[in-house]
Amino acid sequence: MVTRLYLVRHGQTTADKGCFVGSSDLPLSGHGLARLESVSNRLAQVKSWYCSPMIRCRQTLKALEKLGCAGGSVVEDERLREIDFGRWEMKTFAEIAARDTRVVDGWVEYHGFSFPEGESVADFVARVESILDDLQNSKQHRIAVITHGGVIRTMICLALGLSPRDYLLFDVAPASLTILDLYDQGAILKGLNL
C-alpha cells in the first residue's frame, strides 16, 4: 500500500535573504503565508500530522489550523529539525566563503563534511532517514509533515534513491507543498512547490 507524504516547508522567516538558517529558532515574517491557502485545500483530509519543534514550523502549523486543516493531534519530532550550520548560522555564503575558504571547499564532498561547530552531514542524513523510515512504516497512509527545506530536499533524495549530496537539485520554496508517494519498491515525486 502507498504512503503519501505531504511535506510542507515553513513560511518565510525574519532572517535576511540569503542567510543560512538551521538551528536558529526564528519566527515567521508573515510574508508569503497567503500561499498556504492553496496548500490547505490538499491537506483538508489528512489526519496524521508531524511537525519540527522549531517555532517557524509551529507557526506554519497554526496558520494551517486557521485555514481549517491540521486538526487533531500533532507529533513534534526532533528529527525534523533543520541541520545545524554551527558558526555559519545567520551568515550569507559570501561571508562564509570569505572567512572559511578551505572549509567551504570541503563541503563539496558532502557526506564526510561537518559544519564548523555544527552538525555533521552524516548525522543529519541519518536522522532524516530514520524519520522517513518511520513515516513509511506508519499505519497511516496520508501523513502531513511540516518541516524545513533541507529536510524536505534530503527526504526527496533518500526516497528516490538519489545521493543526498544531490539535495540542491530540488528548490523547495517557503510555504510550499511537496508530495511524495512511498511504495515498497521505491517512491514517486508527485509534486514540488505546489
Image (cartoon, helix red, strand yellow):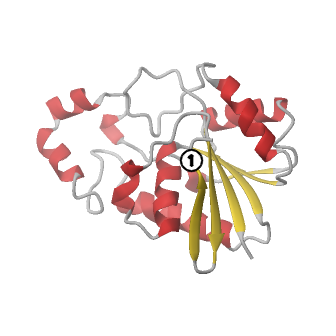
Answer few, some or many: residues within 10 Å of disc 1's Cα (few below 14, many 20 plus, some between 14 and 19).
some
Where does the image place residue 178, in percent across and percent down from the top left? 61, 49
Indicate the position of residue 87 as horizontal and vertical percent values. 31, 36
Asked where in the image residue 91 lies, by quadrant, the reply is: top left
Q: Nearer the viewer, residue 160 or 165?
A: 160
Quarter holding residue 123 = bottom left
Question: Is residue 175 visible to us here?
Answer: yes
- Give left or right: position of 97 versus 25: left
Residue 154: x %, y % from top left: 46, 56
Query: Residue at (63%, 69%) from the top-left corner?
Result: 182
Type of amino acid under label 1: Leu
Tell me, yes or no, if residue 121 can be seen here.
no
Image vertical order of residue 155 relative to residue 34, above or below: below
Q: Nearer the viewer, residue 77 or 106?
A: 106
The residue pinned by badge 1 equals 192
Residue in the image at 40% along x and 53% along y: 167
Residue 110 vs residue 169: left or right? left
- The structure residue drawn at horizontal position 46% and vertical position 61%, both measured from the top left corner, is 157
Residue extending furthest bottom?
A: 185
**Element type where label 1 sits in the image:** loop
| Horizontal arrangement in the rendering, residue 53 relative to residue 98 (left or right) | right
